[in-house]
Image: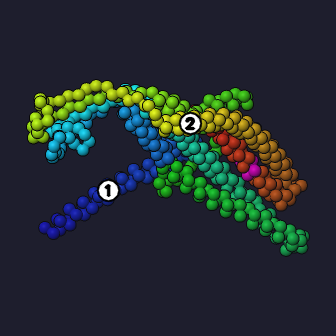
């Protein structure tokens, strides 16, 4: 019987092991799928999907909407009821002045209250600003993810080039040491070769550290676990239509989140100012009250007639005769509105200047990339020429490897210039509000 129990336990263990193997295989398959090459657009889409900042911004927008609804609730029907016990000796009245009742139902609804209405409209304008903050956070996530992706691709490509450069530098150093040992080279040439190799090794260490940092940042933005390997490939940004400086300014003015926020705030200040001015006017409120009274309060001793059910319905009009606070509120709201109008004009000018500068920077970076590209092309053609001369026995190994080192350096310079151009394009797209459209 014990033997049978062992058989069952071993079978159960085998089944659990088999099930665990299947699950482990699924996990490995999922991670293997995640470790496939990731395109730039896919990376941006994943970052937007998993962004905690974007989720928080959406929640904050919901909070702002609820605040606007709370302000609007003053213009909706409000019904309250309650019951209690009050002892009265003498004229029956509660501390608030109303008659003691067994049950009380109160109805209120503001029909016309310009000051409260202005505050409500201002809250709605500021809620729209919070909606714009969602777009701002979205653009920020896109820029960070695209920058990290493009830089990581550049760094990994640069590491491949530097390792090839390191091999060439080592060949040159070995060749120079051999000739120095034979008395055909000065010792200073060996030191020069060692310095070159040390510089390349230092650059490799720098890029390796940068690779680790960027990989961690991108993995966090994409929501990947640490065990997943991210594979990126050199890409260019999605193509956009060429536009003139004037057209870019118009697009930026139309899409600028900062400008829209300033205009919404101006609208909010305008509503507050209008509401403050109209606070001199009467306010109108619908009111209603139902009271269930009882003889226990001795109403018959003070009133000739007694009715247990009492209903009061009407309109309450409040006419302000003198309110010093209203004049001060109007003056404050007017000054705040004027300040906001000036801020809107200043922000519009800032947007124009910013987009002009970003457009100039993008053109300069494009020109710098072209210079780096031609410099790389020249280096590649020189390498091909030296390679041909080496094959013919008219150039030394050191000459060939030295040109290869220079060609690798030109490659790294070109990659840096290309990445700087891409960052300039991202900045210009963000300024003109075209990021979401490009990466959709």
| Residue 189 on image: x %, y % | 86, 68
Which residue: 82% across, 58% down?
402
Q: Is residue 413 magenta?
A: yes
User: Which sits earlier in the primary sequence, circle 1 or circle 2?
Assistant: 1
Mark 1 surroundings within 10 Å by alpha-carbon count, few (fewer than 14), some (14 through 19), many (20 or more): few
Q: Is residue 435 magenta?
A: no
Given residues 235 and 177, the one toward you in this image is 235
Which residue: 20% across, 31% down?
290
Q: Quadrant of the C terminus?
A: top right
Which residue: 15% across, 69% down?
2
- The quadrant in which residue 394 appears is bottom right
Given residues 258 and 331, the one toward you in this image is 331
Which residue: 55% across, 38% down?
332
Given residues 120 and 373, the one toward you in this image is 120
- Label 1 close to label 2 by CB (< 8 Å): no
| Residue 81 on image: x %, y % | 22, 37
Distance CA(mark 1)–CA(mark 2): 79 Å
Left or right: 167 in relation to 37: right
Given residues 366 and 85, the one toward you in this image is 85
Q: Which residue is mark 1?
A: 18
| Residue 31 on image: x %, y % | 46, 51
Which secondary structure is most common in the magenta stretch? helix
**Residue 124 visible in the displayed image:** no
Q: Which residue is mark 2?
A: 331
- The quadrant in which residue 347 appears is top right
Q: Is residue 70 above or below residue 243?
A: below
Report the magenta residues as a range. Answer: 411-415
């Amino acid at each position: 019987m014990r033997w049978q129990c062992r058989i069952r336990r071993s079978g159960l263990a085998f089944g659990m092991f088999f099930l665990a193997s299947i699950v482990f295989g699924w996990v490995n398959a999922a991670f293997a799928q995640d470790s496939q090459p990731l395109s730039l657009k896919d990376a941006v889409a994943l970052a937007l999907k998993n962004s905690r900042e974007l989720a928080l911004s959406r929640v904050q927008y919901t909070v702002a909407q609820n605040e606007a609804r709370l302000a609007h609730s003053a213009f909706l029907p409000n019904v309250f009821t309650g019951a209690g016990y009050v002892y009265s000796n003498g004229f029956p009245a509660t501390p608030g002045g109303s008659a003691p009742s067994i049950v009380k139902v109160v109805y209120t609804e503001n029909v016309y209250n310009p000051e409260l209405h202005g505050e409500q409209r201002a809250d709605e304008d500021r809620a729209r600003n919070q909606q714009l903050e969602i777009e701002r956070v979205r653009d920020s996530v896109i820029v960070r993810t695209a920058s990290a992706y493009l830089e990581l691709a550049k760094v990994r490509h640069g590491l491949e080039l530097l390792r090839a450069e390191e091999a060439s530098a080592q060949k040159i150093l070995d060749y120079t040491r051999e000739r120095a040992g034979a008395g055909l080279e000065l010792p200073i040439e060996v030191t020069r070769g060692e310095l070159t190799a040390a510089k390349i090794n230092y650059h490799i260490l720098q890029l390796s550290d940068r690779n680790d940092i960027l990989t961690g940042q991108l993995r966090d933005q994409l929501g990947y676990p640490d065990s997943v390997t991210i594979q990126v490939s050199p890409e260019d940004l999605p193509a956009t239509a060429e536009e003139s400086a004037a057209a870019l300014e118009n697009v930026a003015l139309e899409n600028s989140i900062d400008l829209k926020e300033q205009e919404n705030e101006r609208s909010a200040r305008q509503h507050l100012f209008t509401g403050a001015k109209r606070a001199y006017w009467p306010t109108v409120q619908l009111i209603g009250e139902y009271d269930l009274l009882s003889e226990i309060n001795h109403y018959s001793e003070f009133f000739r007639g007694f009715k247990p059910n009492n209903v009061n319905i009407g309109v309450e009009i409040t006419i302000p005769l003198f309110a010093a606070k209203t004049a001060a509120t109007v003056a404050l709201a007017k000054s705040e509105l004027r300040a906001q109008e000036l801020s809107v004009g200043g922000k519009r000018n800032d947007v124009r200047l910013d987009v002009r500068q970003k457009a100039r920077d993008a053109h300069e970076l494009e020109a710098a990339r072209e210079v780096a590209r031609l410099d790389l092309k020249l280096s590649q053609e020189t390498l091909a020429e030296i390679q041909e001369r080496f094959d013919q026995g008219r150039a030394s190994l050191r000459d060939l490897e030295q040109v290869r080192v220079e060609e690798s350096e030109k490659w790294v310079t070109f990659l840096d210039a290309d990445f700087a151009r891409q960052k300039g394009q991202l900045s210009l797209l963000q300024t003109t509000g075209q990021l979401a459209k490009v990466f959709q």
